[in-house]
Image (cartoon, rainbow, N blue to C red):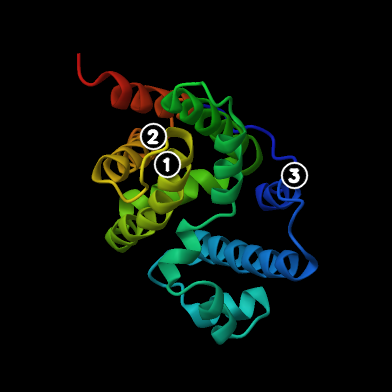
Amino acid sequence: MSAMPRTRSLDSLAEDMQPQLGLRERKKLKTRVAIRRATYRLIAEQGYDATTVEQIAEAAEVSPSTVFRYFPTKEDIVLTDEFDPVIVAGLRARPAGEPFLESVRHVLVEATRLILAHDHEETIQRTTLLVQVPALRARMMQSMATSSRNLCQVIAERTGRDEAELEVRAYAMAILGAVYEASLYWAERDHKDDLAELVERALSAVRDGLR
């Protein structure tokens, strides 16, 4: 797949899609973005292991304590973005009678296309690091627990079931695991495929099982 032209920052786009953010929250978002951008620049120049939090702080013009206030670990800087609230809002905006997995497919495939359109190179860098750095994969599993809780809330709202139910939790993790595996598969194949199509394929496997 050829790189799509980068128009606006994806983080700026995420900010615009959350108009409810107050001034303080927007300032925090800008700080997180600055830290994240500095991290990706440094990693591109010198590699993941050689990049320290102190170097990141200096490049982002903040203190190391500020970096740790926003991101508990270096892994979190690479793995987190500002799109979880946007995706949750997108799911809540889908028609109430629509099958939930169809809502998920629509929102996540569109979000993937949006991400590739605005931060194609950074997405390649992030997924490449996921394949190459075991610490990132381990931290991703922990990070998915937070995303799963958010997704469980939306499933509970749509279905009337308890978000703490085992079946709800398993369903949420199956969805997140499908997207995660699609991302790894994309990177392992040198990003030659259409990531949005891979996400759609993976979600279809959750829906249909293995035929």
Q: Is residue 135 left or right of residue 72?
A: left
Going 61% across and 45% down the picture, which residue do you hit? 86
Residue behind mark 1: 156
- Seen as rendered, the residue at the extreme front is 160
What amino acid is found at the position of numbered circle 3 in the picture? Arg
What amino acid is found at the position of numbered circle 2 in the picture? Trp
Q: Which mark is residue 8?
A: 3
Going 71% across and 50% down the picture, which residue do you hit? 18
Helix, strand or loop for disc 1: helix
- Seen as rendered, the residue at the extreme right is 23
What amino acid is found at the position of numbered circle 1 in the picture? Ala
Q: Quadrant of residue 61?
A: bottom right
Residue 193 can be seen in this image? no
Q: Which mark is residue 181?
A: none
Q: At which x and y percent is residue 148?
A: 38, 49
Q: At which x and y percent is residue 79?
A: 45, 57
Find the distance from the CA under tag 1 to the CA under tag 2: 31 Å
Q: Quadrant of residue 65?
A: bottom right
Find the distance from the CA under tag 1 to the CA under tag 3: 34 Å
Find the distance from the CA under tag 3 to the CA under tag 2: 24 Å
Helix, strand or loop for disc 2: helix
Q: Determine crowd level at label 3: few under 14, some 14-19, many 20+ residues with C-alpha closer than 10 A.
A: few
Q: Is residue 141 left or right of residue 76?
A: left
Mark 3 or mark 2: whose residue is earlier in sequence: 3
Going 64% across and 35% down the picture, which residue do you hit? 117
Q: Quadrant of residue 137?
A: bottom left
- Seen as rendered, the residue at the extreme top is 211
Q: Which mark is residue 186?
A: 2
